[in-house]
Image (cartoon, grey):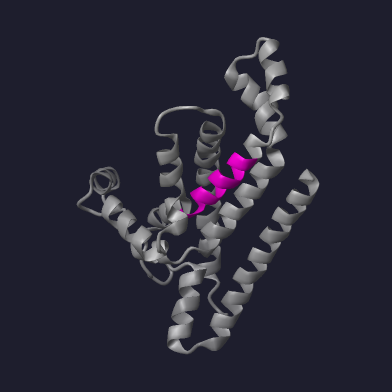
Amino acid sequence: MEDWYPLWLSLRVATVATVIAAVVGVGFAYLLAKGRFRGRSLLEAVLTLPIVLPPTVLGYYLLTTLGVNSPIGRAWESLTGSPLVFTVPAAVIAASVSALPFVVRTARAALEDVDPRLEAVARVAGHPEWRVATLVTLPAARRGLTAGVALGFARALGDFGATVMVAGNIPGRTQTMPIAVFDAVQAGDQATARMGSLVLAAVAVVVLLVVAQTATART
């Protein structure tokens, strides 16, 4: 594999997308785990939707949301002077949306497993709810949160359908590793396809080992 740009781009996109998905996902996970409000089930369903939607359908929705005729697309173009779609930021958004439900679901389970007695002690000590979260809940759930972030990274790194819809397949600009593997297969370049697939598989194995180790440590 001579051109490693798709790998470096994938790592950059996945890293930024994971940070976004982690911040947003843990926030929503905390809300779902600890909150009791009307529409909670609907919010959970919306956050989980990217898992069950076909990637191309998710990509289509993102394309219509971020396109030049959408409010977000027009706002982006007025600020930057260029469209949002078919750019690296579009790839980051697609990867973030794809990774978000994995972070939310794993983080929520971890937060719900925190012993409520520990939180009650912090409240009795006079700490406000945000201090209870930062001092007790989040540290106690850190292993589960780490697993969720790891799964989110793996999903962001391997995203294909949504990314190719909103970021396109522009070699040297928006072509990530999964898209490069697809291109190589289409072109009959088995060596490049094999190398790209091995790299992605190796990353996936490392992530799964991290998740497995985290789960073992929790038990």
Q: Residue at x 26, y 43 (%)?
A: 75
Furthest residue in direction bottom, as rendered: 188
Q: Which residues are magenta?
A: 98-109
- Foreground of the two, 128 or 109: 109
**In this image, 174 relative to 135: left or right?**
left
Dominant secondary structure (helix, strand or loop) of the stretch shown in magenta: helix
Taking 85 as reference, is 34 above or below it?
Answer: above
- Foreground of the two, 54 or 181: 54
Residue 104, magenta (yes or no): yes
- Foreground of the two, 209 or 188: 209
Taking 143 as reference, is 134 above or below it?
Answer: above
Q: Residue at x 68, y 18 (%)?
A: 120
Furthest residue in direction left, as rendered: 69
- Quadrant, the N terminus: bottom right
Taking 98 as reference, is 191 above or below it?
Answer: below
Q: Residue at x 46, y 42 (%)?
A: 44
Q: Residue at x 50, y 37 (%)?
A: 28
- Quadrant, the C terminus: top right
Residue 124, magenta (yes or no): no
The answer to whether residue 82 of the structure is visible from this angle is no
Q: What is the x, y in percent for residue 95?
A: 47, 56
**In this image, 204 relative to 181: left or right?**
right
Q: What is the x, y in percent for residue 212?
A: 73, 56
Q: What is the x, y in percent for residue 202?
A: 67, 69
**In this image, 38 relative to 73: left or right?**
right
For residue 83, which quarter of the picture?
bottom left
**In this image, 202 relative to 72: left or right?**
right
Q: What is the x, y in percent for residue 62?
A: 33, 54
The answer to whether residue 156 of the structure is visible from this angle is yes
